[in-house]
Image: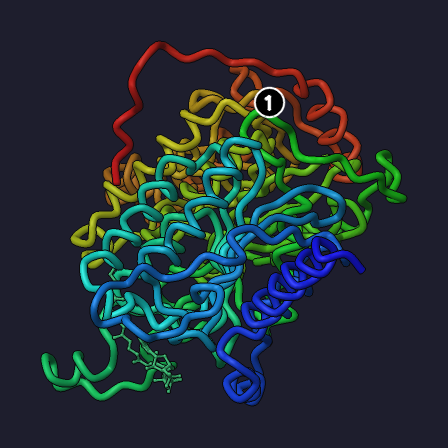
């Protein structure tokens, strides 16, 4: 072997040794501890998430530039693994925080690795996925680490709506660090092993004397049921990673594209006879809107988002003849489907998510109105409800509204009526569109007649019947063009598919503005 060949061999060996050291992260002991906590390592997560063999690592040899307090500290891979790969053959960018290296804490160069893949994702028009498992700002790096967060938040905000951004929380995510996931489109958490909070239990105890565990304060249960911060909870890392793959299937690569169409074995013309047993004309008999959705969509598959928060409002993705659609629906089974603050926030955000990513919206309406109450009024139901109105009006994607039963008052408008920009409004024969329910209406409009009648109860019943005859049906609204057609329930799937196909090339221009001033 020549001298040059020997030198080359040595150089290659050095590269391999360095790479092996980086790939080992914080070492076998810390990896063991990580696995003992039921978690995968940063690299295992990436390989589980991506198509086999597709990971292309970037920034492999980046090292910290951490100043005096970091002198002599080793941080292989800088505490985060970054690069790109494919999911179902579609390119994505990914960063995976490595808790085995300084607790996955974020310093300047760690942040630089993350912003590098975010920039590449934006430039190439691909989703970016963050796998979060970090003790937060790297304490030794002081303000540099705060600046690192700033660089990430800035990109989260400016790339918002340009490319999908998905955050998985697979360990600690505390302090200001929570704001990166909070600025992304979706947050998925692993139950039992992840948490998110601004101030931890110790600080809370010293300030408010409240005693709380990490999990009680910011575990997956809390954020998917109480706060609405997170969208989905899964049992363990693998399930979260599968969840990300599933979710991405409904989304396009970027704001210029449409979501992929997935061929389906479910016939477009499949009749929906089952609906006749789910929704009856008896307005007081509640039903579960999930059953309606499952009956309508391809193979009954509905990826419900935020299924355990504000359950009076259902949101999620499904497919109709292979085409991804976002569904927004009242659920009359919960609080009679009324709109409250959380339901309004939940729907408004989802409508905007669908609109940024060109996903048509189907709205299923069965709603008596906004939830009455001092607490709701004082907490700003006006401001929150306005978000829904704004989001629907702003959305330029194809929008179909289907009124299944009641649609009353302000909620009629908030659930995307014709006037609020729905492209096509359908109703079932069971629908009723009115300012309010017949009983309330009769009591207000005919109060004097009822009071003065010889038999007030008989008069009340008569007036209720009168009002029902006049408005408790879809035909008054249809006669004025507010409803485009009253359709047989059994034909609904076919109708929706045909109508979305009709709207597929919809274009809607809006007047010039910098951006609207959405009520927040
Ligand atoms: C540098 C850190 C670190 C940090 C932990 N480590 N936190 N290194 N900066 N913030 C190191 C530890 O020294 C340890 O190193 C390794 O990471 C694992 O930490 P452990 O404490 O042994 O792990 P564990 O027992 O599992 O506890 C995890 C933890 C705890 C609960 C997250 O580490 C913790 O409370 N860390 C501090 C969290 C924090 O206050 N971060 C700052 C938040 S403020 P060795 O070498 O022993 O393995 C913030 C502001 C962001 O983030 C602002 C953005 C705008």
Q: Locate the C terminus by quadrant.
A: top left
Asked if residue 379 lies left or right of residue 363, the reply is left
Residue extending furthest toward the front: 3
* Ligand 1 quadrant assignment: bottom left
Residue 493 spot, x, y in % from top left: 76, 37
Closest to the observer, 153 or 354: 153
Residue 260 spot, x, y in % from top left: 72, 35
Location of mark 1 (residue)? 424
Q: Residue at x 41, y 61 (%)?
A: 63
Above or below for 85 versus 175: above
Ligand 1 neighbours mark 1 (CB distance < 8 Å): no
Mark 1: secondary structure = strand
Residue 161 spot, x, y in % from top left: 45, 34
Above or below for 180 versus 97: above
Asked if residue 212 lies left or right of residue 493, the reply is left
Asked if residue 357 lies left or right of residue 11, the reply is left
Residue 101 spot, x, y in % from top left: 44, 74
């Amino acid at each position: 072997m020549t001298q040059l060949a020997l030198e080359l061999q040595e150089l290659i060996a050095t590269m391999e040794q360095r790479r092996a050291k980086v790939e080992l992260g914080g070492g076998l002991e810390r990896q063991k501890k990580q696995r003992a906590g039921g978690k995968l390592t940063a690299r295992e997560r990436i390989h589980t998430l991506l198509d086999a063999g597709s990971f292309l690592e970037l920034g492999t040899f980046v090292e910290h530039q951490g100043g005096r307090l970091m002198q002599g500290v080793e941080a292989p891979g800088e505490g985060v693994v970054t690069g790109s790969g494919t999911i179902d053959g579609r390119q994505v960018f990914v960063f995976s925080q490595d808790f085995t290296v300084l607790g996955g804490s974020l310093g300047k160069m760690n942040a630089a690795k993350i912003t590098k893949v975010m920039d590449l994702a934006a430039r190439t028009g691909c989703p970016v996925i963050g796998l979060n498992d970090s003790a937060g700002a790297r304490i030794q790096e002081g303000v540099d680490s705060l600046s690192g967060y700033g660089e990430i938040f800035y990109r989260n905000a400016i790339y918002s709506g340009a490319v999908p951004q998905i955050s998985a929380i697979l360990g600690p995510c505390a302090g200001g660090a929570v704001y990166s996931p909070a600025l992304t489109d979706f947050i998925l958490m692993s139950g039992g092993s992840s948490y998110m909070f601004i101030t931890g239990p110790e600080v809370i105890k010293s300030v408010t004397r409240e005693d709380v565990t990490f999990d009680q304060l910011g575990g997956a249960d809390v954020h998917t049921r109480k706060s609405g911060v997170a969208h989905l909870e899964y049992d363990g890392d693998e399930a979260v990673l599968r969840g990300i793959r599933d979710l991405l299937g409904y989304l396009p690569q970027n704001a210029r594209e449409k979501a992929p169409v997935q061929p389906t074995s479910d016939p477009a013309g499949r009749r929906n006879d089952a609906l006749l047993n789910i929704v009856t004309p008896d307005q007081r008999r509640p039903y579960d809107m999930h059953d309606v959705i499952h009956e309508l969509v391809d193979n009954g598959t509905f990826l419900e988002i935020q299924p355990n928060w504000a359950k009076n409002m259902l949101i999620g993705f499904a497919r109709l003849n292979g085409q991804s659609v976002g569904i927004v629906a009242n659920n009359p089974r919960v609080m009679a489907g009324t709109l409250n603050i959380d339901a309004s926030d939940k729907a408004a955000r989802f409508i905007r998510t669908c609109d940024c990513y060109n996903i048509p919206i189907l709205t299923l309406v069965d709603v008596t109105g906004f939830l009455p109450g001092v607490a709701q009024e004082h907490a700003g139901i006006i401001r929150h409800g306005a978000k829904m109105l704004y989001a629907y009006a702003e959305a330029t994607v194809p929008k179909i509204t289907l009124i299944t039963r009641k649609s009353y008052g302000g909620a009629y408008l908030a659930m995307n009526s014709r006037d609020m920009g729905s492209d096509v409004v359908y109703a079932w024969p069971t629908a009723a569109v009115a300012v309010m329910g017949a009983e309330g209406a009769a009591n207000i409009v005919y109060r004097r007649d009822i009071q003065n009648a010889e038999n007030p109860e008989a008069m009340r019943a008569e007036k209720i019947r009168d009002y029902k005859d006049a408005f408790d049906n879809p035909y008054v609204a249809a006669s004025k063009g507010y409803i485009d057609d009253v359709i047989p329930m059994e034909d609904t799937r076919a109708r929706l598919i045909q109508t979305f196909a009709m709207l597929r090339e919809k274009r809607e221009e809006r007047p010039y503005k910098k951006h609207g001033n959405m009520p927040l």
